[in-house]
Amino acid sequence: AQKITQTQPGMFVQEKEAVTLDCTYDTSDPSYGLFWYKQPSSGEMIFLIYQGSYDQQNATEGRYSLNFQKARKSANLVISASQLGDSAMYFCAMREGNSGNTPLVFGKGTRLSVIA
Amino acid sequence: GAVVSQHPSRVICKSGTSVKIECRSLDFQATTMFWYRQFPKQSLMLMATSNEGSKATYEQGVEKDKFLINHASLTLSTLTVTSAHPEDSSFYICSAKEARTGVGYTFGSGTRLTVV
């Protein structure tokens, strides 16, 4: 079974508008972490935001916020005031457990295109 | 912040030859390095986890004799693609977790391998 599901292969958003990228996850471990990364065409992985399973509040980092709904096992990324430079692939990822030896598992990604 | 330097960024090799990819943690000790492969328009798939001073753990379906991983020091992990074939052409990227920075995983900039 997929651990991370991103159901939107591609999304379009008008510049300056907000956009939500969906992510659902599957784990039975009570301790886990959820990550969002941006991958531009250059291939580098840019860390955007993190949400721990025990965090009480939704994570925010500048224009990025994470809508964490634990009961629904969803961790949607909200990008506010979209910019042309936001056009890229976005990956949701999960780390199960708390160990530094645990790799991230990635979803299939969503390609975001910001339109002027 | 934590930096992982990955080289080369791009390599073209002939079928049947071997290629070595290096990932070096510049300002921290990477006890564990994760190696991912990404085919065009696809997600990052974990290939193996390398631990300093011990044998790497390979994911199911990844040939350990073909993808040799060496993690001889706390700052250097290498992936050697042996007897490369065109189907090995892909984007290879390494990642390490740096304890001091908390939750983030640091990624190398990736290596685009083309086998001709």
Image (cartoon, coloured by chain):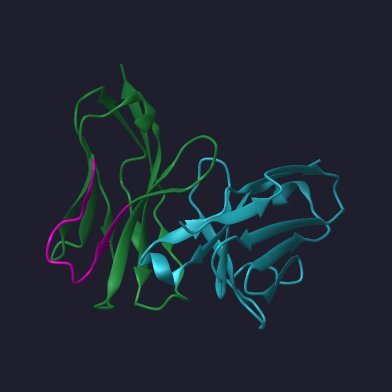
Q: Between residues A3 and A67, which one lies in front from this camera angle?
A: A67
Q: Magenta span has B47?
A: no
Where is residue B107 shown, x and y percent of the image? Answer: 52, 55
- A66, above or below B104, in the image: above
> Is residue A4 in view from this perspective?
yes
Where is residue B60 shown, x and y percent of the image? Answer: 58, 71
Q: Between residues B13 and B30, which one lies in front from this camera angle?
A: B30
Query: Is residue B9 rendered to the left or right of residue A33?
Result: right
Name the residue located 31 percent from the left edge and 46 percent from the top edge: A7
Quadrant location of the N terminus of chain A?
A: bottom left
- A43, above or below B16, in the image: above
Name the residue located 15 percent from the left edge and 61 percent from the top edge: A72
Name the residue located 44 percent from the left edge and 61 percent from the top edge: B105
The span shown in magenta is A49-62
Where is residue A70 shown, x and y percent of the image? Answer: 16, 64
Which of the 4 quarters of the picture holds residue B103?
Answer: bottom left
Query: Is residue A57 rendered to the left or right of residue B5?
Result: left
Quadrant location of the C terminus of chain A?
A: top left
Q: Which chain is cyan?
A: B
Query: Is residue B56 rendered to the left or right of residue B85?
Result: left
> Is residue A27 in view from this perspective?
no
Colour of chain A in the image: green
Where is residue B84 shown, x and y percent of the image? Answer: 80, 54
